[in-house]
Image (spheres, rainbow, N blue to C red):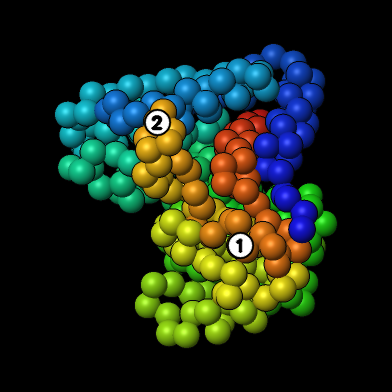
Amino acid sequence: MELIDGNQIASTIIAELKAEVTGITGRKPCIALVRVGEDPASVSYVRKKEKTAAEIGITSRIILPPITISQTDLIRQVADLNADESVDGILIQSPMPKHIDELLVFRAIAPEKDVDGLGTMNLGKVAQDDDTGFVSCTPAGIMALLARSGVDLKGKHVVVIGRSLLVGKPVALLALQKKAGANGTVTICHSGTSNLAEITRQADVVIAAIGRPEFVKQDMIKPGAVVIDVGINRVPDESRKSGYRLVGDCAFAEVSTIADKITPVPGGVGPMTVAMLMSNTVKAYRQREVK
């Protein structure tokens, strides 16, 4: 069994981006990070993105609207960032307060600055194999993990467990694309799928993104399969100071005994998400500079 080290691969990508940005004369790429409210996980995620941007040499602008901001006012702030020529990418940290319709806010971001890849235009470009679009960061990270671990999806049966807009749907589209590293035969499963284990046992590559702790067991995996675990779940653990431990959507201890390659949790897909956000920001800068 080979462990796919997301930390190491993400560090390599960040180093490559740093070298590229260092070579840029004049204005550096800039990302606006918008966080509404003080959700502890969101505070941590935005801090990590700000730190990584600084390491690369990307300028980050942190915008902290109050948790009481109306949807209209938030969309107005997005419009201001769309019009700001010094901003190349915009990320709105999720989750947002319940009175905010996240999809409407994502759609308000100008497609050329939608570095999180969640707007309608960029999702459509993924479906059309259009490389000028921005791929949602977690699916992009999954594809980079596979490529940099020597996994070519051509001719392989890829089973995606999960159908979310954030991971399941876009990663299935990416695996289907007619290009190097992709060309997979894709099945999408979800919580309503009958005979799920029967389907996953046919897979050469399993991408687990169902959001249920240790849901995927050993008897659901074909020996020698590649397993990408997207889940990150907190489960109670009184032996730890925090009172919990992080686990993925796969039962790692048992699945790792038969998988050929597998990502750990933490340290697998997670670090890639931030790296791909920064990659998208540099891409946005380049494409806007060309115009």
Q: How many marks?
A: 2
Displayed quadrant of residue 43: top left
Q: Position of residue 148 (x, y in %)?
A: 79, 50
* Disc 1 target residue: 254
Q: Which residue is rendered at x = 73% and y = 24% of the image?
A: 18
Q: Please say whether residue 114 is visible from this viewpoint.
A: yes
Cβ atoms at labels 1 and 2 below 8 Å apart? no
For numbered disc 1, what is the local secondary structure? helix
Gap in angstroms between the C-alphas marked 1 and 2:
25 Å
Using residue 262 as the reference point, say whether residue 249 is left or right of it: left
Q: Position of residue 112 (x, y in %)?
A: 53, 42
Residue 234 numbered tag: none
Out of 57 and 237, give the one closest to the viewer: 237
Using residue 274 as the reference point, say whether residue 237 is left or right of it: left
* Disc 2 target residue: 242
Out of 82 and 150, give the one closest to the viewer: 150
Q: Which residue is rendered at x = 61% and y = 33% of the image?
A: 278
Q: Position of residue 259 (x, y in %)?
A: 70, 65
Of the numbered discs 1 and 2, the one sitting upstream in the chain is 2
Q: Which residue is rendered at x = 23% and y = 38% of the image?
A: 97
Out of 45 and 256, give the one closest to the viewer: 256
Q: Position of residue 30 (x, y in %)?
A: 56, 24
